[in-house]
Image: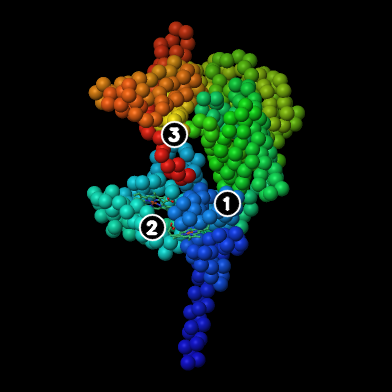
Amino acid sequence: MRFLAITLTTAALTAMLWAEGIPVKSQLVQDKCGGCHTLDSQQRMSRISYQRKTPEGWEETVRRMVQLHKVSLTPAEARAIVQYLGDQQGLTASEVDKISYALEQREDQEQIPNEAVRTACATCHSYARIAAQRRTKEEWLKLKSFLLAIIPTIVYQHRYMDWMTTSDEALAYLAQQFPLETPEWQREKNQTAPGETAWVVRGYQAGKGDYVGQIKMSVAADGSRQTQAALEFADGASTTRTGTGHWYGAASWRGNAQWLEGAKGREIYHLSADGTTLRGRWLGVERPGIAGEETLYRRDGQPRLVAVFPKTVQSGAKNIELRIYGADLPANVKPGDLSLGDGLKVEKITAATTDRITVEATVAADAKNGRRVVQVGTATAKDLLCVYDKVDYIRVLPERTMARLGGIHYSKQYVQFEARAYNRGPDGVPGNDDDLEIGVVKPNWAIEELYNAYDDKDREFVGSIDQNGLFTPATEGPNPKRYRSAENSGDVYVTAEYKPGNDAKAMKARAYLLVSIPKMRDTLIP
Ligand code: HEC
Ligand code: HEC
């Protein structure tokens, strides 16, 4: 009897020590979700305590609880619940790094490491949507009945394969790959988000170009953050931007910002595991598809170089103005403190602050094609400046992409094309890895028919492109002017024609563009 009691106690102790699950300490979550998700003695709630996901993941779950299970929440309560769960049960910096491309809507070819997951799961949504979750084994396995219940046609849709068996394999793999608690989660979960901080930013907006600037982040009374940015483009134009936002956990920033000119953007940024660099993209609100990418470096007193404008110089160029941007650069720099690399000579420093140095420089006529190491005092950077002798070819980017019809019931999905010029690089052979990107050029833009269906005349219906490379798709819905009142969807080539000099031969390049129907259901994770 006594022996049995001891055994039981040890078993109970072991169970307690190994018990997984994240306690839910929020009274609001307990009140609003507790009706269906039971709370145990360790404040763990059924289902909820056994998953971790991105703020978008939590938002989708909460939306489903409202839409499918009739949970009643005010918008403020829903936001507070997503904030709490996003903070306490999110992904760490190193975990989110692997799937941030999907959240930031970067165009990317997904690498799916498991065949069963690829065929049984990534057929309806991205792999990232799955890899953006951490669950206990039991919670991974529950997904099968969940999917069968919400999509009763799932097996039929996958009738070319044995979905019932392959999904088991996929879920077993995921349970092993993405458990709820991991050493990195234990290590990183108690990190705190940046508070009052200053950042130097380098950004790029297709259609407008490179920019740099300073960003201040301050803490508002309600714990949210306010941002203020002063930005300067490579072409000299400047602007300001103000915004508000929230950190979810220590690493995920979600903000809303507005430029001086009125345009708005939604910021989806992720902090590096060492806390020094915040990287991500802002997505245009008025024109979906218009976006920019930014890297923010936290100002910590260490001298740092961030950009040189222009970022490419031609051999033989005399007395050109170069602006060198950075943070905490030495005061009172002399030409001797500066180096622009082989074949470049600083003639004089025309202006200098600790954030920005303007110089006049000359490039030797025989300077070799290639990147240069730029040095100011102790700060060096190797990717900020390059020398080229001539434009060898151009490319249209993105090379393959998709726009979406819209404008009546749904929003249009725009595409900003760019023509970029390249030099053959140090090896003298064009079309390989050492080629140098010289920058964006202004070509003549046009849309060309792609002959893959007889007489469909897609070129006349899909939309139009302006001379800055912005493609505006046509409206959705049947078009009586089209054969059998078809939609305006279709596929075409977008072509660019550019002359590097007045009497030079024109260079041509093209991209493939698919113009598809609108996105009917807006998911937060693709
Ligand atoms: C009225 C009952 C009800 C309430 C209240 C409720 N849920 Fe649920 N919840 C369900 C049901 C039923 C399921 C299983 C089906 C599903 O996943 O949609 C579920 C599943 C879940 C899951 C697992 C989802 C998955 O992907 O496996 C999570 C997490 C969750 N709920 C969170 C919440 C949160 C957070 C709240 C409070 C805002 C909440 N629930 C309130 C009924 C409820
Ligand atoms: C037939 C299409 C389809 C297939 C195949 C599919 N899913 Fe999904 N999945 C969905 C839909 C639709 C949702 C969104 C449910 C909602 O919230 O409304 C979803 C949601 C999810 C979610 C988020 C659930 C939450 O609330 O946190 C995960 C995780 C997921 N799927 C994993 C998988 C895995 C793993 C597989 C393969 C075993 C798979 N899916 C296969 C359609 C599919």
Q: Quickly name the residue at label 3.
A: 409
Q: Residues within 10 Å of mark 3 (few under 14, many from 20)?
A: few
In the image, residue 86 above or below residue 480: below
Q: Is mark 2 within 8 Å of ligand 1?
A: yes
Which residue sits at x=60%, y=39%? 256
Residue sitting at x 39%, y 61%: 142
Say which element carries label 1: loop
Question: Which colour scheme appears in the figure?
Answer: rainbow
**Mark 3 and mark 1: span between their CA atoms?**
26 Å
Badge 2 is on which residue?
146
Q: Position of residue 286 (x, y in %)?
A: 53, 31
In 3D space, how far apart are the residues under numbered discs 1 and 2 (Cα atoms)?
A: 26 Å
Q: Residue 106 shows which numbered tag?
A: none
SS for dot 2: helix
Secondary structure beneath dot 3 equals loop
Residue 159: image location, x then y, percent:
24, 50
Name the quadrant containing residue 433.
top left
- Can the viewer see residue 472? yes
Question: How many numbered callouts?
Answer: 3
Left or right of 342, for residue 154 = left
> In the image, residue 458 lies at what x, y percent?
33, 23
Q: Residue at x 40, y 48 (%)?
A: 127
Whether residue 378 can be seen here? no
Q: Position of residue 143 (x, y in %)?
A: 39, 58
Marked residue nearer the N-terminal end (1 or 2): 1
Residue farthest top in this picture: 503
Quarter of the rendering occupied by the C terminus: top left
The three-letter amino acid code for the residue at tag 3 is: His
Residue named by callout 1: 74
Against 330, residue 73 (above or below) is below
Q: Nearer the viewer, mark 1 or mark 2?
A: 1
Residue in front for this viewpoint, 513 or 183? 513
